[in-house]
Image (cartoon, rainbow, N blue to C red):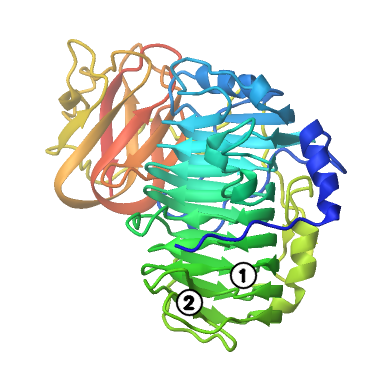
Amino acid sequence: MRKPVALRLSAALGTLALAAATGVVLNMPTASAAAAGATGYATQNGGTTGGAGGTTVKATTGTQIHQALCARAATSTPITIQVEGTITVGNTAKVSGTGCNTAAGVIELKGISNVTLVGVGAGAVFDQIGIHIRQSSNIIVQNVTVQNVKKSGSPTSNGGDAIGMESDVHNVWVDHATLVASGGESEGYDGLFDMKDSTKYVTLSYSVLRNSGRGGLVGSSDSDLANGPVTFHHNRYENIDSRTPLLRGATAHIYNNYYVSLNESGINPRAGGKAKVDNNYFKNSKDVLGTFYTDLPGYWQVAGNIFDNVTWSQPGDENNPAGPNPTSNTTVSIPYAYTLDAASCVPSIVTATAGANTGLKVSDGNCAATTPTATPTSTSSPTTSASPTATSSPGGTNLSIGADSDGSSKASGTSYGNVRDGDTGTYWSPSGSTGSVSIKWASATSVSRINIREASGATGNIGSWRVLNGDTGAVLTSGSGAGVISFAATSLKKVTFEITSSAAAPKVAEFETYA
């Protein structure tokens, strides 16, 4: 496979490199701590809420980020970590605990869920240290700068990726990030935003990717085809050699992005990959869309794009540019609602909104920047993303009666069946403070409400929880406290109530389910 050419950085980039090497951050305005919810494919598969409903802590070093993760009651206990300052390899140590699986020299989000990592105050700069998301779900990374992460030279971190995701990752939203390098592979850098080995339902929005040989990939090889779908919108790609992104077998929705100086190639679907490319603006670039460096074809659906001083190479055995007059060769169905800005205003709206420390501004859908309503956070007491009602019956037939049950962390002397026997005098309790219990049926059953009844003497013990689609693992809703919980009607064979924290030993007398 042809390798991208290393960047020939202009003298103007010397200032950026100097700032990265010294930890100096230029023009870093105060930023909000939270913004409106996820967009794009991150809204699917149960949605992406990050640490909503959990506690909020502050961190100024990588070690403190790891400590915050590890101090949780479980790997799924919701948490928002507000980051301010410069995070480096030198101030990021491995930390151990029940809520984490960390490593030194990299921000490790491994084997966890329900986490928001957000830059606040004067800004969060991850200098020469990458963010690694592995075997994790429901993650939000917002308002951070990640710069000059290397896979060779010194120091090295995260295989050279600014943000890298791999190994059964799903539901990740990266928003208002600035991801920058100072060269290509020959200078020691790899991708800015990489996804592989079953990474699904990801959105990258309002972010800047700059000065790199490789923007990012979805699928690490032509046999790594079980990734995506991914949404890219309102991002600025500038001075990138290739991979904006590279799609191997994956589906991507790519809209309202601003591409400037793509030196070798741009959006590169291959090996069956599909891209819906809407209302983007391409400027001073080469081969911005097509299948390149392979004879395994990819496909695209195009509409409303502007090609400003874009050049196209001739087709060949391993080169299939979409231009000079790009036309669609497939169709891609998008399952979520979205609003397109006109391509003509993309340079101005993306310049006004994309990247860290821009006040989390977004487009209003009419080419004007607006600041979304902030989501309140608290550093002292948890909030909830769903509020159960009182424990009276919600009405209708309790579908749990006659169903089957299973779970995790069963304590001695209790049975999962005690939650579906219609008897509040019996109960299930986990062996510790967390655990899960499920109701399951032989055939798909529509469920929109559950009622969690606590045993006598244990009222109020259940803290935070999640309701999961047991068939897919998708989060249907989350919150805290027992009672009636409602969510969008879902057809499934198994629904799981997962307790992620508790004030004392939780005891579930009945797990009722209703259509």
Q: Mark 2 points at which residue?
A: 319
Determine whether, in the image, residue 2 is placed left or right of residue 362.
Answer: left
Determine whether, in the image, residue 78 is placed left or right of residue 353.
Answer: left
| Towards the viewer: 138 or 324 | 324
User: Pointers 1 and 2 in contact (CB under 8 A)?
Assistant: no
Name the amino acid type tagged 2. Answer: Asn
In the rendered view, tell whether residue 26 sits above or below residue 434.
below
Q: Residue extending furthest bottom?
A: 325
In the rendered view, tell whether residue 379 sits above or below residue 303.
above
Residue 127, labelled with which disc?
none
Residue 173 appears in view? yes
Q: Name the residue under label 1.
A: 339
Separation (CA) of disc 1 from disc 2: 33 Å
At label 2, counting other C-alpha atoms closer than 10 Å, the crowd grade (few under 14, some 14-19, many 20 or more) is some
Q: Identify the residue at image location x=47%, y=23%.
A: 100
Image position, residue 61 (x, y; %)? 68, 22
Q: Is mark 1 on a helix, strand or loop?
A: loop
Q: What element carries label 2?
A: strand
In this rendering, the count of numbered labels is: 2
Residue 23 appears in view? no
Report the mark closest to the observer, 1 or 2: 2
Name the amino acid type tagged 1. Answer: Thr
**The N terminus, quarter of image:** bottom left
Q: Identify the residue at image location x=37%, y=67%.
A: 271
